[in-house]
Amino acid sequence: MIDLKIIRESKEEVEKALARRNGGFSISPLIEIDTEYRKALSEWEALNRRVNEISELFKTGKVAKDQMDAMRQETKDIKQKQKDIDRLKANLEEKLSNTHLAIPNLPDSSVPDGIDETFNVELKKWGDIPKIDNPKHHYEIGEALGIFDFERGVKVAESRFTVLMDYGAKIERALMNLMLDLQSKKGYREVFPPILVNRNCLIGTGQLPKFEGDYYKCADDELYLVPTAEVPVTNLYRDEIIEADKLPIYHCAYTPNFRREAGSAGKDTRGYIRQHQFNKVEIVKFCLPENSNEEHESLTRDAEAVLEVLNLPYRRVILCAGDLGFSAAKCYDIEVWFPAQNKYREISSCSNFKDFQARRANLRYRPADGGKPKYMHTLNGSGLAIGRTMAAILENYQQPDGSIMIPEALIPYLGGVNKIAPN
């Protein structure tokens, strides 16, 4: 969340920054509630000081007998007023928290203006686009190879769940291991977290309360299936104070992920691109504020390196202010080439959240000089979405005879197999 002090002291600047996001956000309701809350708090504290004054007078024995009853009654009246104010404060505090949590992060000054993805700016391209005559879609290739079973996925669960068979399952697992190995070599400490998280975790990373309907929740518990490993990994250090010399902290994690895709009706209904359950390797960083821009660049390069190892052509774009995710101050999308669609598709979002998540999750560090704890910065990116990576491999490595070649980096993970052909 945005520092409330900044909102109070720089209302116009904050609203101007938020206006760069699609639609803008008014912070006037938050300021009004905050003003009411601080007024109630001030009144409660003034009453409390009066109660303490009366108590001290009684202790010193300086209260005249003819004033004792009046002072006792005053104390009684004050405590009743405090109870009334306590109820008001609790109500205002809840409203203040909910209103504050609903305000997105401020776009970084380096983020371009724009209202949607058409205003995103391409920064680089890598790799050669393969020359394929009449390229087939990944789902056509996968079904022909017998590695995607969409019908049985629906039978076992519902639409947008897929069964992977034979080399489909093996490639998925091989990609997971390759990605974890690559990131571990770059200094990311591997984590295998729970795939059920509590509500506070989702609030901490910014998914809740805004996107309440997007996630799968257990019926009998206040637990949610993770939408991304970012959620449990970022919350590993919630409510802790990390010594400055322990930062930065790098983690990589594989998890299955679960999303209802409530806002994507009609999008990518065919294939293995947009699933309710999908696998992903996530890379997460915790760092000092002054280093987060540099860490963002290196994190993005670490995600891109996976595509380079697999020799998959990609491009990097910087998201405009109107296309930024709720919690991000700055975000690069990495998009991989899909021959059958004749375009690049997003396979990783690499975000710098600055102290937005840290304030929500209470992620702090103690400065080297031993001063008051401060909020650290958090960053994360997909390294990569495994299903989309497999789909990109199927399309980019397809052969005229219906077979696919295996990227060289994956061959050791598949026991030396370098080609998969239809039965």
Image (cartoon, rainbow, N blue to C red):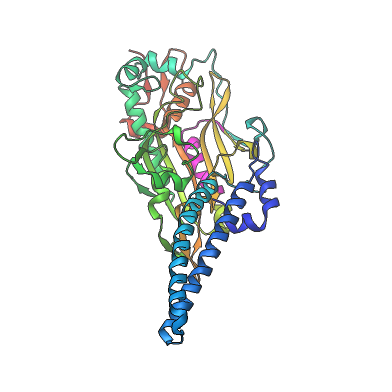
Residue visible at 38% across and 52% down in the picture: 236
Q: Name the image quarter holding residue 257.
A: top left
Residue visible at 40% across and 18% down in the picture: 142
Foreground residue among 14 and 107: 14
Position of 217 compared to 42: left or right?
Answer: left
User: Relative to 177, does residue 60 appear above or below in the rendering?
Assistant: below
Task: Assess whether residue 119 is covered by the magenta stretch.
Answer: no
Please indicate, yes or no, whether residue 11 appears anywhere in the rendered image.
yes
> Where does residue 213 sit, x and y in percent of width and height?
45, 32
Position of 336 compared to 197: left or right?
Answer: right
Position of 113 compared to 151: left or right?
Answer: right
Foreground residue among 282 and 11: 11
> Where does residue 203 sit, x and y in percent of width and height?
45, 46
> Where does residue 398 sit, x and y in percent of width and height?
46, 19
Residue visible at 43% across and 52% down in the picture: 250
| Residue that extends furthest to the front in the rendered view of this protein | 66
What segment carries the magenta color?
296-314
User: Relative to 169, does residue 280 appear above or below in the rendering?
Assistant: below
Please indicate, yes or no, whether residue 369 appears anywhere in the rendered image.
no
Residue visible at 63% across and 42% down in the picture: 25
Task: Assess whether residue 307 is covered by the magenta stretch.
Answer: yes
Foreground residue among 346 and 178: 346
Judged by its main secondary structure, the magenta piece is helix
Foreground residue among 10 and 33: 33
> Where does residue 156 sit, x and y in percent of width and height?
30, 20
Image quadrant containing the C terminus: top left
User: Relative to 83, does residue 56 appear above or below in the rendering?
Assistant: below
